[in-house]
Image (cartoon, helix red, strand yellow):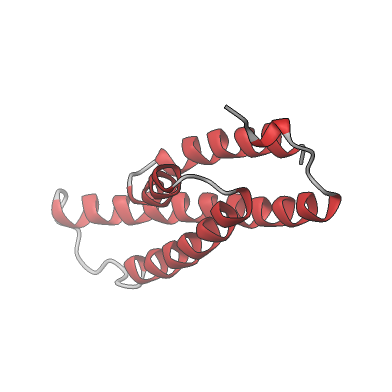
């Protein structure tokens, strides 16, 4: 079976992949951080019964996650990920801490396969 590492990658394509990878990494971390903040808010509100918490945390996470989805699809198209890998990466922003691990795995794979 042939992999991306078996074929030479043009410098122009490497630059596009490197740029998409950087955008993905930034948003993966931002999504993970905002998801942790949202998780703390939910725990404080429903378990510890803290009132008067800011209502905008969920909104911010939602918008950051939306941008994460767009930039992840952009990277997936550029590196030609299979659908299952793309979907798994997209869902990583919905489970606390998972986006940090998936970001590391995907970054390692992209750097290895495309020399960026």
Among all residues in the image, which is located at the extreme top? Answer: 1
In the figure, is residue 45 to the left or right of 11?
left
Among all residues in the image, which is located at the extreme right? Answer: 11
Q: Is residue 34 above or below residue 112?
A: below
Q: Residue at x 64, y 57 (%)?
A: 23
Viewer-nearest residue: 97 or 52? 97
Q: Residue at x 73, y 50 (%)?
A: 18
In the figure, is residue 22 to the left or right of 38?
right
Q: Residue at x 23, y 55 (%)?
A: 42
Q: Number of labelled discs?
A: 0
Q: Is residue 3 above or below residue 22?
A: above
Image quarter hosting the C terminus: top right
Residue 6 position within the rendered picture, expressed as x and y whole percent measured from the top left: 71, 30
Viewer-nearest residue: 88 or 98? 88
Among all residues in the image, which is located at the extreme front? Answer: 1
In the figure, is residue 69 to the left or right of 3?
left
Residue 67 position within the rendered picture, expressed as x and y whole percent measured from the top left: 49, 66
Image quarter hosting the N terminus: top right
Q: Is residue 83 above or below residue 69?
A: above
Residue 63 position within the rendered picture, expressed as x and y whole percent measured from the top left: 43, 70
Residue 93 position within the rendered picture, expressed as x and y whole percent measured from the top left: 40, 51
In the figure, is residue 84 to the left or right of 79?
left
Q: Is residue 102 above or below residue 69?
A: above
């Amino acid at each position: 079976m042939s992999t991306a590492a078996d074929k030479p990658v043009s410098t122009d394509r490497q630059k596009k992949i490197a740029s998409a990878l950087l955008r993905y990494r930034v948003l993966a971390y931002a999504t993970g951080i905002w998801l942790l903040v949202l998780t703390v808010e939910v725990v404080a509100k429903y378990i510890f019964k803290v009132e008067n918490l800011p209502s905008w945390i969920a909104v911010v996470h939602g918008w950051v996650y939306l941008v994460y989805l767009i930039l992840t699809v952009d990277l997936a198209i550029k590196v030609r990920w299979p659908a299952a890998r793309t979907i798994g990466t997209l869902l990583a922003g919905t489970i606390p801490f998972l986006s940090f691990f998936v970001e590391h795995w995907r970054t390692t794979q992209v750097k290895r396969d495309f020399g960026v």
